[in-house]
Amino acid sequence: SSLYLTQTPVRSADLHLPSPISSLLQGVFQSSTGGLQYILTQAQPQDLILITGSLYLAGYLKKYLQDLNIRWEETQNLT
């Protein structure tokens, strides 16, 4: 498992993550599309990329993936 984050431009506070989570952190990106593009180059076909955050961010990245002709699957229930 790997964790990649994007920084929110309106917040300048340092990022403090609990130790179990920080050990998974692989990168912090200035832009959501730049981070996603990097992750897409690193992902294997069987990998799952999970996008979390605001509805705005999810919608924005969904459109970005659609423009790249990358399949987007929405999961309604993970249990």
Image: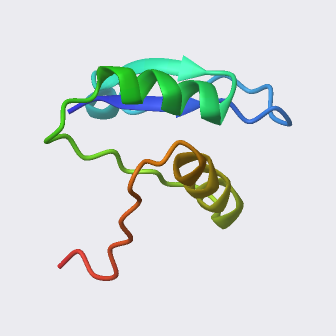
**Residue at the spot x=52%, y=48% of the render?**
65
Q: Is residue 52 visible?
A: yes
Tell me where residue 74 sits by quadrant.
bottom left
Q: Position of residue 47 (x, y in %)?
A: 19, 40
**Residue at the spot x=74%, y=27% of the render?**
13
Q: Is residue 40 above or below residue 62?
A: above
**Residue at the spot x=65%, y=54% of the render?**
57
Q: Is residue 73 above or below residue 6?
A: below
**Residue at the spot x=32%, y=33% of the render?**
21
Q: Position of residue 5 (x, y in %)?
A: 52, 31
Q: How many marks?
A: 0
Q: Quadrant of the N terminus?
A: top left
Q: Is residue 16 visible?
A: no
Q: Which residue is nearer to you in this view: 6 or 44? A: 44
Q: Which residue is nearer to you in this view: 10 or 72? A: 72
63 vs 19, left or right, is right
Q: Position of residue 23 (x, y in %)?
A: 28, 21
Q: Quadrant of the C terminus?
A: bottom left
Tell me where residue 2 sits by quadrant.
top left
